Amino acid sequence: MNVLLIGSGGREHALAWKLAASPQIGRLFAAPGNPGIAAHAECVALDVAVHAAVVAFCRDSAVGLVVVGPEAPLVAGLADSLAAAGIRVFGPSAAAARLEGSKGFTKDLCARHGIPTAAYARFNNAPKAKAHVRRLGAPVVVKADGLAAGKGVTVAMTLPEALAAIDDCFEGAFGEAGAEVVVEAYLEGEEASLFCLCDGTTALAFGTAQDHKRVGEGDTGPNTGGMGAYSPAPVMTPQMTERVMREIVEPTLAGMAAAGSPFCGVLYAGLMITAGGPQLIEYNVRFGDPECQVLMLRLDDDLLPLLVAAAEGRLAGHAPRWCDEVALTVVMAAAGYPGRLRTGGTIAGLEAAAAGEDVAIFHAGTALRDGRLVAAGGRVLNVCARGPDIAAARERAYAAVDRVEWADGFCRRDIGWRALARTGSA
Ligand code: AMP
Ligand code: GLY
């Protein structure tokens, strides 16, 4: 089967790597792809915002499945356009992508279906939102309703911070995304992510992970898209996963289907495991980046038939096999990230670095310039490794990091600290 993969980051490189290994793959295309993806797929310069162009490409190239990596094209309705043209697609409709595209939509769904999540209220003006946070007091959480590239959430430990965050939203710091604000109660616990493959009615647990959102060691400094991850998340025991499926994911899927917008694709549940049980922090409608990279390293099964089954509503009865080992990824970012970036520096040594035992290196933000591989984004490389335990996976990943020759790159040196602390070896 010919497959078109949409996206250009480390998540898509990991998906391309796994799809290319499928015995069922025909031609694999990526739009736009990146230099790492080009080792596994034919990169095509399609403007994915022009749905008619994507449909025409799929027809011309006999594409049997489109896999959409990032959220923006989903929220923009690419899956709807493909489905309307009779092209099989893995990824939710625009209506179902509201689970990520509107925090207020998701909170209302949770309220209607008794899904555990932080208490909340929605506001479309600053005075009412401020009056509400003054009543609640700090700590409190202020969120821009819409997609804000991971920057629309303020966990305010003081009242002035919360009031300033409300002003930011309504003064346009997040554009349209901030036209509405959700104010939430502060949750305490350990964060973890559960990924589920969904076909509209059936949800299949598809691995757990923990991310490292802050740029600095010890979880300090500004938020980022994610500086590293590992899988599985020790806090997500089989019992906890089962509980989250029953209390959170399954009612969500049923609620979306009942509302006429069944969810097909990856449902990524961001969770807080509190003393009272799991609470939903937020949904994303795609794989996490860099969480996808560690999931792909642990998936022992062929990915392609699973994605086809999800797209065709045939997931029931599938039980993906996972390797028992731990996978960990370290993000190498360009100096300055997440602020002003120093890009353009030459990257070398990747082949030697990737030769380590159970190591894989995915490109997140690279480009080829005059035959040289250069840094072309904030998050540039994902150096991943598998090992029998978190300590071994981490050692292999950092050994590979140390072989990468890139003067302007940096990474956190403490990826995996939380899981290591649990094992007592930190
Ligand atoms: P983002 O991925 O940018 O939406 O970041 C959201 C982050 O804010 C989460 O990963 C949590 O760390 C934090 N957060 C969101 N909602 C809450 C909440 N109700 N209580 C405590 N922390 C929260
Ligand atoms: N790594 C977090 C995300 O993909 O949203």
Image (cartoon, rainbow, N blue to C red):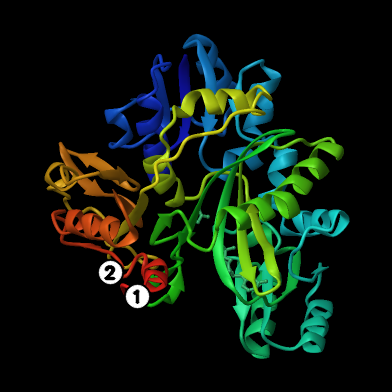
| Residue at (72% x, 33% y) in the render | 200
Image quadrant of residue 229? Answer: bottom left
| 86 relative to 187, above or below | above
Label 2 to label 1: alpha-carbon separation: 7 Å
Residue 43 appears in the rendering: no
CB under 8 Å between discs 2 and 1: yes
| Residue at (33% x, 37% y) in the render | 34
In the image, what residue type sits under mark 1?
Glu
In the image, what residue type sits under mark 2?
Arg
Check disc 2 and report its element: helix, strand or loop: loop
| Residue at (76% x, 62% y) in the render | 116
In terms of depth relative to the viewer, which is nearer, 74 or 264? 264
Disc on res. 217: 1
Q: What x and y, as percent, mark residue 352?
A: 11, 45
Disc on res. 331: none
| 48 relative to 341, above or below | above
- Residue that carries the numbered disc 2 in the rendered image: 413
Q: Is residue 331 left or right of residue 238?
A: left
Placement of the C terminus among the 4 image quadrants: bottom left
